[in-house]
Image: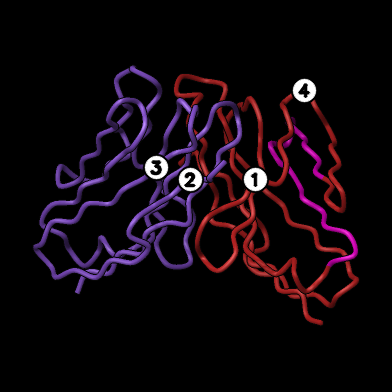
Chain colours: A red, B purple
Amino acid sequence: SQQGEEDPQALSIQEGENATMNCSYKTSINNLQWYRQNSGRGLVHLILIRSNEREKHSGRLRVTLDTSKKSSSLLITASRAADTASYFCATRYSGGSNYKLTFGKGTLLTVNP
Amino acid sequence: GAGVSQSPSNKVTEKGKDVELRCDPISGHTALYWYRQSLGQGLEFLIYFQGNSAPDKSGLPSDRFSAERTGGSVSTLTIQRTQQEDSAVYLCASSFSEKLFFGSGTQLSVL
């Protein structure tokens, strides 16, 4: 399977703490994206990191990419109860069908007030 | 402008019936995707449309599934002779660049 795999599957933290989620993938990529999903419905794009980038920031989000290890991490700093959601990494491969975005199974983050 | 719109938001059907799910993408978005998400699972790619090119149907799980996109805009996903294992949330997304914009999905329940 070309799917990315998130780790951990579930994470529970207190408000104000940082949350780190990891994603591993299997083949060369053009870019890796993180999405958020509330209540099992539509996903919302959070951040995109290209294969030639190592780190990217957006507000309280920090994404890193290590292409040698085929892994990425998403850090949410100073978490809030409203950050409770499922987070998915998605990879766009550099080979043939490079328009496809392949999603992992996600990490369920619970932020307790 | 409006986001990606999917209808119906919920559909309950009996096993063996046909269903049609509709997706209205964001105006101007040339790419349109259908994904399926079973309970607690990731997104399973179904089909991809790009402009006037032939669609990539490689993710359709069986010949009971088909999709079309008329005039490069609205798309319909049809499931014939529904089975209980077809129960899932069907998500549509559109794009004009690298990031996808998702609709809220159709929750399909096959009894």
Mark sitting on residue A45? 1
Q: Are the residues flagged by discs 3 and 2 in contact, CB closer than 8 Å? A: yes
Q: Residues within 10 Å of mark 3 (few under 14, many from 20)?
A: many
Q: What chain is tagged by disc 3?
A: B
Spatial CA distance of label 1 from label 2 is 13 Å
Relative to B13, A48 lies left or right: right
Find residue B24 and name its label: 3
Circles 3 and 2 on the same chain: yes
Gap between marks 1 and 3, in whole Å?
Answer: 19 Å
Locate the C terminus of chain A and report the quarter of the image it occupies.
Answer: bottom right
Q: Percent from the top left, x then y, of residue B5?
A: 44, 49
The amino acid type, in three-letter code, at marker 3 is Asp
Chain identity of mark 2: B
Residue type for callout 2: Val
Indicate the secondary structure of the residue bearing disc 1.
Answer: strand
The residue lying at 46 percent from left, 19 percent from top is A96
Tell me the chain of label 1: A
From this view, report whether residue A94 is shown above or below residue B105. Answer: above
Say which residue appears at 82% left-offset and 54% top-offset: A75
Q: What label sits on residue B4 in the rendered view?
A: 2
Question: Which mark is in front, 2 or 4?
Answer: 2
Q: Is residue B82 left or right of residue A13?
A: left
